[in-house]
Image: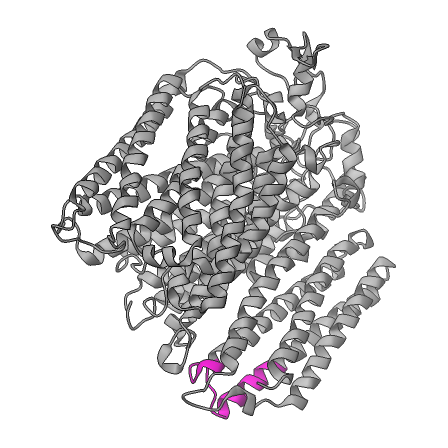
């Protein structure tokens, strides 16, 4: 959700408070009881909630990965670990470029910031493309969404993660366009940081999924 | 208010950025009066009222369903309802009361009161707040539209697999249920993020965590529970939806699936949900009882920490809902123990309320009557709850009316009575006049008698083995009299509700109640009734727990409270309140900025039911819904929270450069998190 909704609460009632808030709106962190800006706190809370969302899906997959399948191949037989390792590496590298984007914008180096934002989005898109390729390969090898328990659990979990990456890409592209139009001054570096929080979270979730789902044998 | 003033558009200084109207479909709304203002409002107080009014309409609907159930069961071999329709009735009754009545009712109180009680001007994200209300409303309407589109869900409010699968529930009812609850879940999640941020970040100077009123604390704990419980049921609903709509196998037993997966996911959500429903009601009575016992709350820190303890322990008891499902002796023993333990912090609360009442100068207003009824009735429900921790006992009672009696004592005798206590207590604050105490007391006694007459006998027929969720029962089981009494009781409850409606209608003409009609203890009573849009003319600086009380009362040598001759309200108040000793602050409120109304929340929210209808009927609708949501998300995200075009008083200190900074600040933040609700 919009992180822009800092309310006017800090604007004290005294008339000079108005000028005060206008100046300080760029550094809202100083107004809150915890010192953390509302937007950042909200993102942390949202990510906490997301942990249980992925926790539920991962548990479901772990419950069903050991079950006998009644039709089609078990998902463990058709993994292409080298391929997925490469795409995982790509996603991990996107966290690095995300950090570089943030550090550039904090130094008001907008050209570099845009470069890194776009690179992060492209790396994310590469990962999603890899996932699409992986899904189509699996389907060709006989594991459809409805084929067996493991298929349903696998596609739902990894697909859900893929949707998260896609939303992250959308956010990154929005930031890129905003920066192009001069609407992302370095005073708003925190916006990039908050999107970064989301992006790193999605990355970490993938590390867990890759380990539990792909690497550890059933 | 200054907000509504007409004003020419800002003149742009050189180099200033032109004001944008993102995706320019609408001009920004500016009115804070009239019916349109309710559609676009971002004021937490108006949103709270919307939540409450909507929840009460759903309460009437859920009550009608309950009456139909009771009419069917009034006599053996009842013929009022077809068994199919009966199933729809109890499913929708439970779903409505939990998701569309008590949860939004508590959201109403939380929305209205938290900012006032912690001395804030609004919640942390006002437009997000509006969005969660509209999402909730459309989710509820979507769920209810199932009655006209092929039949309501009929699998019970917890829709166990595999009964909820396509094979056994071929209609669309369960689809409406899964999708509808996902939508209201989004509303709850947005609300939780917003209200937790508000509690943690928006407190007035000096309002430390352990000076927050108990209601704020309990609401905070409940919002944390929501934050972590909602994603779990979302996963469950998601899996069930994929099973039903796209042929996945999560609950397909033929493919080797485990139907217990549903039960675990549902109850990992479901048990914290119990505390989500009851903790804020505990908070309400923890503020009502001290006011009318004329004493501070006994053991405030214990009250807070027992609430937190309940919040933590609530995650470790879910499988006591599953003792009959064969989860094994170790699990049963572990969950039996944890269930016994969670009675301890609950007991602490009961004793603290009794300690508050002890030697108090009790004033039995309607609010106090409801609060005391909560304490006693919740104790009864709590005791039958502890009985269920004894697994053999539980196995005996599973699926009987004893369970129905238990959770109605907790949720109706507890939550709903707490909610009515809150309604009578805060009505003068919200609307400026009291509800009639005479009608209120009649309402209370009618509801009290009706409630106990309805649900008391269910303990007995339950122990005698009468099964719940069964449309009829045969003659000669010895259940006839009790069932007739229960039905009579349920109609008394209905009458009592009508008395409340009547009370609301006739009390409109009551005289103005003043800012502080009950001699309250917490900050919301320090502002006018109803509070101004900006809540407080002066931002309070808090020095005590129950700060408003300490502003009004000092102590004599014996430590007895003595009312000060003069004290100062935090806003301009009515004349009667001033005559009672309150001074007014002398400040210029025109400098206070408030977030501007917005169309985007309602626009964005309408996309969700479109997607849901689309998934059930035709994907084109879903595509349309998706486009609306994306447009809405960008619209909401790119729109500045405070409309630069809206007048907020002409004060010379607000130069163009500062305006530019602020707009950039607010606009720049925009797309940062603006996809959260899609991600959820």
Whether B596 is drawn above or below B166: the answer is above
Q: Which residues are magenta?
A: A130-151
What is the image's colouring? one colour
Instruction: State yes or no: residue B87 in magenta.
Output: no
**Residue B140 in view, yes or no:** yes
Most frequent secondary structure within the magenta stretch: helix
Q: Quadrant of residue B382?
A: top left
Whether A198 is drawn above or below B656: the answer is below
Q: Which residue is painted at 79% across and 72% down in the image? A: A96
Q: Quadrant of the C terminus of chain B?
A: bottom right
Nearer to us in this view, B588 or A196: A196
A64 horizontally vs B536: left or right: left
Residue A10 placement (x, y as % from top left)? 73, 35
Q: How many marks?
A: 0
Residue B626 placement (x, y as % from top left)? 49, 62
Nearer to us in this view, A111 or B468: B468
Nearer to us in this view, B183 or B427: B427
Instruction: State yes or no: residue A148 in magenta.
Output: yes
């Amino acid at each position: 959700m919009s992180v822009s909704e800092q309310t006017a609460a800090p604007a004290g009632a005294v008339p000079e408070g108005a000028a005060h808030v206008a100046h300080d709106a760029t550094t809202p962190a100083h107004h809150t009881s915890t010192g953390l800006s509302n937007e950042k706190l909200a993102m942390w809370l949202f990510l906490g909630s997301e942990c249980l969302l992925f926790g539920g899906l991962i548990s479901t997959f772990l419950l069903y990965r050991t079950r006998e399948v009644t039709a089609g191949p078990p998902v463990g037989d058709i993994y292409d670990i080298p391929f997925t390792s490469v795409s995982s590496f790509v996603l991990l590298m996107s966290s690095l470029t995300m950090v570089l984007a943030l550090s550039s914008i904090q130094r008001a180096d907008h050209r570099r910031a845009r470069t890194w934002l776009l690179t992060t989005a492209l790396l994310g898109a590469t990962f999603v493309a890899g996932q699409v390729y992986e899904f189509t390969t699996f389907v060709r090898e006989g594991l459809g969404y409805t084929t067996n328990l493991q298929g349903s659990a696998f596609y739902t979990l990894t697909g859900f993660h893929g949707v998260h990456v896609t939303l992250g890409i959308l956010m990154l592209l929005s930031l890129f366009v905003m920066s192009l139009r001069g609407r992302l001054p370095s005073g708003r570096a925190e916006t990039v940081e908050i999107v970064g929080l989301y992006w790193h979270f999605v990355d970490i979730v993938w590390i867990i999924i890759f380990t539990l789902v792909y690497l550890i044998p059933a | 208010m200054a907000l509504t003033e007409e004003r020419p558009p800002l003149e742009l200084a050189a180099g200033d950025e032109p004001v944008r109207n993102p995706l320019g479909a609408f001009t920004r709304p500016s009115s804070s009066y009239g019916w349109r203002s309710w559609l676009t409002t971002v004021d937490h107080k108006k949103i709270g009222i919307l939540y409450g009014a909507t929840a009460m309409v759903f309460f009437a609907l859920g009550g009608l369903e309950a009456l139909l159930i009771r009419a069917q069961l009034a006599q053996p071999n009842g013929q009022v309802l077809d068994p199919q329709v009966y199933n729809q009735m109890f499913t929708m009754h439970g779903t409505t009361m939990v998701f569309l009545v008590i949860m939004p009712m508590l959201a109403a109180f939380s929305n209205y009161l938290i900012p006032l009680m912690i001395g804030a001007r609004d919640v942390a994200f006002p437009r997000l707040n509006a969005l969660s209300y509209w999402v909730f409303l459309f989710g509820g309407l979507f769920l209810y539209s199932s009655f006209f589109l092929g039949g309501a869900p009929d699998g019970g409010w917890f829709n166990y697999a595999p009964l909820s699968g396509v094979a056994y529930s071929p209609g669309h009812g369960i689809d409406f249920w899964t999708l509808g609850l996902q939508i209201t879940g989004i509303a709850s999640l947005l609300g939780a993020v917003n209200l937790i941020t508000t509690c943690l970040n928006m407190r007035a100077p000096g309002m430390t965590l352990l000076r927050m009123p108990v209601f704020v604390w309990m609401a905070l704990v409940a919002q944390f529970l929501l934050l972590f419980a909602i994603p779990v049921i979302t996963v469950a609903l998601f899996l069930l939806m994929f099973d039903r709509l796209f042929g996945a196998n999560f609950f397909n037993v033929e493919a080797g699936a485990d139907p217990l997966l549903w039960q675990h996911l549902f109850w990992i959500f479901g048990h914290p949900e119990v505390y989500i429903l009851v903790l804020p009601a505990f908070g309400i009575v923890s503020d009502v009882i001290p006011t009318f016992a004329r004493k501070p709350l006994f053991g405030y820190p214990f009250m807070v920490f027992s609430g937190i303890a309940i919040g933590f322990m609530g995650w470790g008891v879910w499988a006591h809902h599953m003792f009959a499902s064969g989860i094994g002796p170790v699990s049963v023993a572990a969950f039996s123990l944890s269930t016994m333990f969670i009675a301890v912090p609950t007991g602490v609360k009961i004793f603290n309320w009794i300690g508050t009442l002890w030697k108090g100068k009790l004033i039995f207003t309607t609010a106090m009557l409801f609060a005391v009824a909560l304490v006693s009735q919740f104790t009864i429900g709590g005791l039958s709850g502890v009985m269920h921790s004894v697994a053999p006992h539980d196995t005996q009672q599973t699926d009987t009316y004893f369970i129905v009696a238990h959770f109605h004592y907790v949720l109706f005798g507890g939550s709903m009575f707490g909610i009515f206590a809150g309604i009578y207590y805060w009505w003068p604050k919200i609307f400026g006049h009291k509800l009639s105490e005479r009608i209120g007391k009649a309402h209370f006694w009618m509801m009290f008698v009706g409630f106990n007459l309805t649900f008391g006998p269910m303990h007995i027929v339950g122990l005698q083995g009468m099964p719940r969720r069964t449309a009829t029962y045969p003659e000669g089981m010895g259940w006839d009299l009790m069932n007739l009494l229960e039905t009579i009781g349920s109609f008394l409850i209905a009458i009592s509700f009508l008395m409340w409606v009547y009370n609301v209608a006739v009390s409109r003409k009551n005289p103005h109640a003043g800012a502080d009609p009950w001699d309250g203890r917490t900050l919301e009573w320090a502002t006018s009734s109803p509070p101004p849009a900006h809540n407080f003319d002066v931002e309070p600086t808090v020095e005590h727990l129950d700060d408003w009380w300490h502003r009004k009362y000092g102590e004599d040598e014996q430590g007895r409270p003595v009312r000060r001759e003069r004290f100062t309200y935090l806003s301009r108040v009515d004349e009667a309140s001033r005559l009672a000793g309150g001074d007014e602050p002398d400040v210029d409120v025109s400098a206070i900025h408030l977030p501007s109304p917005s169309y985007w929340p309602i626009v964005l929210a309408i996309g969700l039911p479109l997607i849901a209808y689309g998934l059930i009927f035709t994907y084109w609708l879903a595509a349309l819904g998706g486009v609306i949501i994306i447009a809405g998300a960008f619209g909401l995200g790119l729109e500045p929270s405070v409309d630069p075009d809206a007048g907020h008083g002409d004060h010379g200190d607000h130069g163009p450069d500062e305006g530019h900074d602020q707009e950039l600040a607010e606009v720049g933040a925009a797309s940062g998190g603006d996809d959260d609700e899609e991600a959820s």
